Image (cartoon, rainbow, N blue to C red):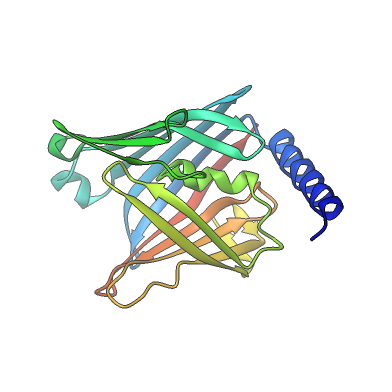
Amino acid sequence: MTIKSLLVFAALWICAASQAYAASPNSVSATYDVYKGNLRIGQIEETYTRDNERYSLSSTTRAVGLLAIFNPGKIIISSIGLVGARGLQPHRFSDQRERHESRNRQALLDWDTKRLTLIQQAQRTTVALPDGTQDRLSAMYQFMFLSLQAGTTLDFPMTNGDKLDDYHYVILRGETLKTPVGEFDTLYLDSQAKKGENRTEIWLATQQYNLPCKMTITDSDGDQLTQVLSKLEIK
């Protein structure tokens, strides 16, 4: 590729990224119902807000029905950081478990030193921080800033506060998906898990900023958990 071609490509990339940044919403409120088979077992409430170059994300998961009697504690996840031309750049991730505090964990992402610090109780582990790293929560909202329609694969590093892993998805055109909020044209992301790994499938609502409208996680034993969008407000 010639220098002139590289400059044209870079200009187009920056233009596309800037358009995605400008077009992204200032706030999102989303509720998901969680199912195991046909049984509704939980509910997730999430909020995303952006104030100029800063963003804040929170997610609260509660058990419902009989499960709530035996497991009344909530899971509260948060992510804060910056938002720019390339989308979300998380700085702090937190995963807090009510009634199971020993499982609480944090991740501190220091982009100046390119170091990721993982914190669980008194244990702190520091590792190299790759470019483009997302956390478990910011990854679901980073899709708003990506032009996925023309892509075939998606790769990125992600931390859950306990470790850092590389994630790979194949991108396909998905079905028209019916949810309690309405019908969505979708893109379908499949992690194509190997034997013994968990498989993740994500359906993104293409006309709603590529926000997830359904996600299914299948473990190595074949058990599935599915979350489906049940409420959505975008500003």
Of all residues shown, which one is farthest toward the bottom? 195
Question: In the rendered image, which quarter contains the N terminus?
Answer: bottom right
Residue 20, image x, y percentages: 71, 41
> On screen, 60 above or below 192?
above
Q: Is residue 62 left or right of residue 147?
A: left
Instruction: Give residue 141's position: percent from left, percent from top.
Output: 54, 43
Instruction: Give 104 or 45, whichever is nearer the viewer.
Output: 104
Q: Quadrant of the C terminus?
A: top right
Can the viewer see residue 8? yes
Res 84 → quadrant:
top right
Q: Residue at x 44, y 51 (%)?
A: 157
Residue at 74% from the left image edge and 37% from the top image edge: 18
Residue 45 horizontal side relative to residue 49, left or right: left
| Residue 83 drawn above or below residue 212 | above
Q: Is residue 95 visible?
A: no
Question: Of residues 87 and 112, which is closer to you in this image?
Answer: 112
In the rendered view, would you say 2 is above or below 133?
below
- Residue 34: x and y in percent read 37, 54
Residue 10 appears left or right of 181: right
Residue name at image x 41 percent, y 57 percent: 166
Q: Is residue 162 left or right of residue 84?
A: left
The residue lying toward the viewer, choosing from 128 and 153, is 128
